[in-house]
């Protein structure tokens, strides 16, 4: 987490150093080294952009509005594994197959806000 917090400053410094070095080397290099310089600068620019994005949200889409069925109305196979939460008389079951994709779900069970994760 500490590296993630410092990544924008680090990539900004690395980008500046890369551009400075590329500018200094540009006039004294041949054609192939100039190609290597352009590729290096492009790689640093891509890394700097990725340091500022939350790409984990691209991979694991949070469930915006969870929908629940009754036990009788569910289309789950009888052998499918679920995670369950119960507070008082309110209970929920979260299918492992869905949680494996989303990894986190915010819900309220029995008036208690919870974060279900797998």
Image (cartoon, rainbow, N blue to C red):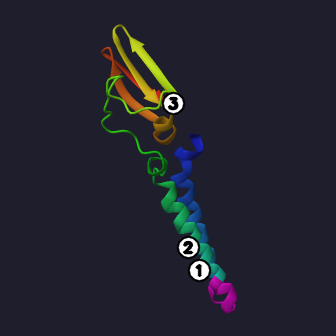
Other-residue count near label 2 (Cα within 10 Å), few / some / many at <14 / 14–19 / ≥20: some
Along the polypeptide, which appears first: circle 1 or circle 3? 1
Taking the magenta stretch, the answer to whether it contains residue 112 is no
Please state which of residues 36 and 88 is positioned toward the viewer in this rendering.
88
Quarter occupied by the N terminus: top right
Other-residue count near label 1 (Cα within 10 Å), few / some / many at <14 / 14–19 / ≥20: some
Magenta stretch, residue numbers = 25-35
Left or right, residue 21 beside residue 79: right
**Image location of residue 29, percent across then percent down:** 69, 89
Cα–Cα span, label 1 and label 3: 52 Å
Q: Residue at x 60, y 68 (%)?
A: 17
Please state which of residues 82 and 60 is positioned toward the viewer in this rendering.
82
Tell me the residue that label 2 is attached to: 42
Tell me the residue that label 1 is attached to: 38
Q: Secondary structure at mark 3?
A: loop
Q: Tell me the tag on residue 80.
A: 3
Cα–Cα span, label 3 and label 2: 47 Å
Q: Residue at x 46, y 37 (%)?
A: 98
> Mark 3 touching mark 2, by CB under 8 A?
no
Q: Residue at x 59, y 45 (%)?
A: 3
Q: Tell me the tag on residue 78.
A: none
Please state which of residues 28 and 62 is positioned toward the viewer in this rendering.
62
């Amino acid at each position: 987490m500490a590296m993630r917090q410092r990544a924008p400053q680090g990539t900004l410094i690395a980008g500046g150093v890369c551009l400075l070095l590329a500018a200094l080397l540009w006039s004294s290099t041949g054609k192939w080294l100039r190609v290597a310089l352009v590729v290096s600068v492009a790689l640093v620019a891509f890394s700097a952009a990725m340091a500022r994005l939350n790409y984990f949200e691209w991979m694991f889409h949070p469930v915006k509005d969870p929908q629940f069925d009754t036990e009788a109305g569910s289309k789950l196979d009888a052998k499918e594994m679920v995670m369950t939460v119960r507070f008082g008389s309110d209970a929920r079951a979260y299918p492992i197959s869905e949680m494996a994709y989303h990894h986190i779900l915010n819900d309220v069970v029995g008036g208690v806000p919870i974060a279900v994760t797998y």
